[in-house]
Image: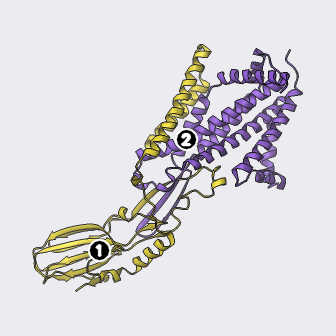
Chain colours: A yellow, B purple
Amino acid sequence: MKSYAAILLPLVIIFIGVYLFVPKAKKPFLINLIVFKYTFAVYCALLFLATLLVYALPEKDFVQQMQSDKTELTSDAYYFAHRLWDISGQDDPDSSKKLYQNFSEDYTLTGNLIKLDIADDFNGMVWIEQKDFKDGILEARNYLTPYLIESFDFSSQIRPPEINLNGDILQIKPSGRYSLDFKVFKDNFLTSQFRGSSPGSSFGSNMVSGNEAVHLYIPQGMEVSTSYGNIIYLN
Amino acid sequence: MSSANNVLVKIACRQYLYKLKAFSFLGLIVTQVVALLFSYGGVGMSGMGTNQLSLTVRNYSSDFVIIFTMFWAFIMAISYTKKHAKSIDFTLISSRLSSSLSDLSVFITISVLGALTSTLSGMFLRLFFYFTADHGSIINSSFKLPFSAWLQSFLAVTLYLLLVCSAGYLFGMLMEVNKIFGFIIPVLLFGLLRAQNEIFLNMIQFFNESSLLIFAGKTFLATAVLWSLSMLLFNRMEVRL
């Protein structure tokens, strides 16, 4: 889009320059005025139409503000992010409302040994849980605690780590630095004099960065070889 | 109302309609379209980040459009004090008072239309980003402005534009009296602002009002003062031969 603006801006400047400085052919004055009046009417109609369309847009399309108390939400998210290992003790992490699942994949294993190759820059936890049966399937899930900015939950936008199985090596590496770009529409500078700060104007000042955990559900009797330190064996 | 007043109002109305018919809004459209292009990059940006996360928040508003519209209104007000603009008055039976009243009416119209288009342009900007940017990056809380907030915004911008027009009209009149005012006044204002002059700052503070009603009262008062001064200058100008 930036390229569009880069093309449009010089075009508009050239247009204004041409309009102001290039001598125009003599035209009947009143015809020009009528054209200008119509142009203004069309411009106003466009703006009204845009306004109507804005109000007709579905609410669910935007980043939603959560209804709960902001302080409570933030403190909860902060608490869960630093007590992720506590949640690992639960029978079913999927049922936890404190966790989001953003990755789920099953891998077929060939041997009885799995080597974990975890990238140095991966900061998440790894939970390893053994099944009660031998089905030769490794189930990998990725969970994360809420990522909040103010009372906005943007956990759904966090990308999961890259998990790949090559032979008996399971590679886990972060998907790179997340980059989130948000847009906030503020009141104009004159109106803020009467309305105070507009909603969303302090957006971004209070952020809780969540934590993540890769849950590996391995078949019975499977051995795991790894040098990674941040691992919890659930059984 | 006396018959003389009645006639004055009729003449002023006729002059107003005549001036409005001759008025082109193309300048306003071009100004606002350019301002919208400048608004594309946002009016502010904040960012923060951790090892894993980089967060950028871009703020958008119709600030540029309003500032550009104010410039346009100021220049329009000055242009109405020029000789060629004043000569329009001679096509109809008129007096100095009716001419000033019709000018004031034109500026009220300009202020209302300028405020309407500049506040609605903010909606256009929202729609533009809705269709061109990722919806998931737009915060809902301020996207759909409540009608009361829009109305407040519209009234505030209208009043400020009226104030700008009045100031521009007086500035134009002073320039008609002597061209040197075109240099002295901007320098004086800039100097007072640089020096943080207390009287000047109090003058600005006078309009820093949180109640729209009181602000409206102050604006009308200031407009009346500026207009009276302009009228005074206009009345002292030489007549056309």
Above or below, B87 against B101 in this view is above
Q: Quadrant of residue A35?
A: top right
Residue B229 appearing in the image: yes
Residue B240 lies in quadrant: top right
Mark 1 surroundings: few (<14), some (14-19) or many (≥20) residues within 10 A? few
Residue at 24% x, 68% y is: A163
Q: Residue furthest bottom?
A: A235
In the image, what residue occupies the spot 42% across and 57% down?
Answer: A63
Residue shown at the point (78%, 29%) measured from the top left? B101
Q: Are marks 1 and 2 in contact (CB under 8 Å)?
A: no
Q: Residue at x 22, y 81 (%)?
A: A129
Left or right of residue A128: residue A168: left
Q: Amino acid at mark 1?
A: Ser
Q: Which residue is mark 2?
A: B120
Q: Is residue B26 above or below residue B239?
A: below
| Image-based side of A57 in relation to B181, left or right | left
B213 vs A153, left or right, is right
Q: Are marks 1 and 2 on the same chain?
A: no
Please give the chain letter of the residue carrying mark 1. A
Q: Who is closer to the viewer here, A226 or B175?
A: B175
Give the residue number, with chain letter if any, for mark 1. Answer: A95
Chain ID at mark 2: B
Instruction: Say which amino acid is labelled 2.
Output: Leu
